[in-house]
Image (cartoon, grey):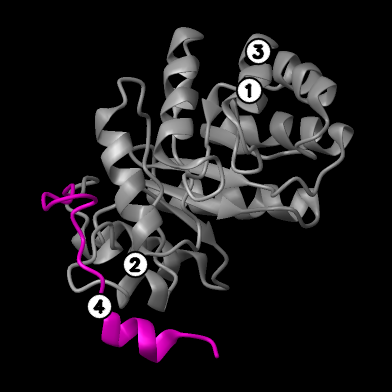
Amino acid sequence: MRRPFMVDSDIHAAADRIIAAGFRNLKLKCGGDIDAEIARIAKLRKYIGPEYGIMVDANYIFSEYQALRFAELAAEHHILWFEEPIQPENRRGYCRLSRKSPIALAAGESEFTAHDCTDLFVEGAVQFIQPDISRCGGITECQRVAVAADAFGIQYAPHVGFSGVVCVAASLHLAAASRNLAFQECMITPNALREELAVNPYGLYTQVQDGTVAIPEGPGLGIEIDWNAVERLWDR
């Protein structure tokens, strides 16, 4: 499991909280001044040591030139992946960056079909693919993405972000069934649609144990919707 978006002002306290929750990998939001971001990464790496993984996520804020400079500077801190470094539509840019970057590239949350993702595989543009089951055609289409990725030797790391419990439960099932699974995303940021919408929510950070989490075992997705919570949370 990995925890995305460490944006806390006290990076040491944030790391302590995440590691104490049972995570083995941490993800940093990046996209500000490059030198300042590299200093932040260096501070985190020095604090947590080599045994924990670090990912960085730019949400495509960088230009191609900026992304390459960032990757070259960040590489010495042993970054697992550089997520959405540039605009998702810039396929040629991804290909060029992938050939030059010393850090593996990850993308896919902005793709909506297996065909879109396969374009990235054929061109060798990414090393990790991250479709979101609530955006990319549901379980069936995301399974096509995972299988196609496996054929190209690309690892599957489903995105959930701020999605609710239905997306998380579905993602957990597909992740468990995917041979090329690398990581399953898990958020610590509070989200009522994830934590309160089901009687028996799964995939919560409080359920992580030594970097793993249980898969729902009941019928269907294995969760039971709390209709009282639906009524309470319904935006009228």
Distance from the alpha carbon under mark 4 to that under mark 1: 36 Å
Crowd band around label 1 with a 10 angstrom C-alpha radius: few (<14), some (14–19), many (20+): some
Q: Give the residues in magenta.
A: 214-236
Distance from the alpha carbon under mark 3 to that under mark 1: 14 Å
| Residue assigned mark 4 | 226
Distance from the alpha carbon under mark 2 to that under mark 1: 39 Å
Where does the image place residue 72, in percent across and percent down from the top left?
72, 29
Q: Left of 64 or right of it: where is 116?
A: left
**Mark 1 or mark 2, which is nearer the start of the sequence?**
2
Helix, strand, or loop for circle 3? loop
Distance from the alpha carbon under mark 3 to that under mark 4: 43 Å
Q: Are marks 3 and 4 in contact (CB under 8 Å)?
A: no
- The verdict on residue 216 being magenta is yes
Q: Quadrant of the C terminus?
A: bottom right
Q: Residue at x 20, y 67 (%)?
A: 224
Which dot marks residue 115?
1
Which dot marks residue 124?
3
Where does the image place residue 99, in percent across and percent down from the top left?
73, 13
Q: Left of 148 or right of it: where is 104?
A: right
Q: Are marks 3 and 1 in contact (CB under 8 Å)?
A: no
**Mark 4 or mark 2, which is nearer the start of the sequence?**
2
Q: Are marks 2 and 4 in contact (CB under 8 Å)?
A: no
Helix, strand, or loop for circle 1? helix
| Residue assigned mark 2 | 17
**Mark 1 or mark 3, which is nearer the start of the sequence?**
1
6 shown above or below 99: below
Q: Residue at x 36, y 45 (%)?
A: 171
Residue 125 seen in the current view: no
**Mark 1 or mark 4, which is nearer the start of the sequence?**
1
Q: Residue at x 52, y 27 (%)?
A: 128
Q: Nearer the viewer, residue 203 or 7?
A: 203
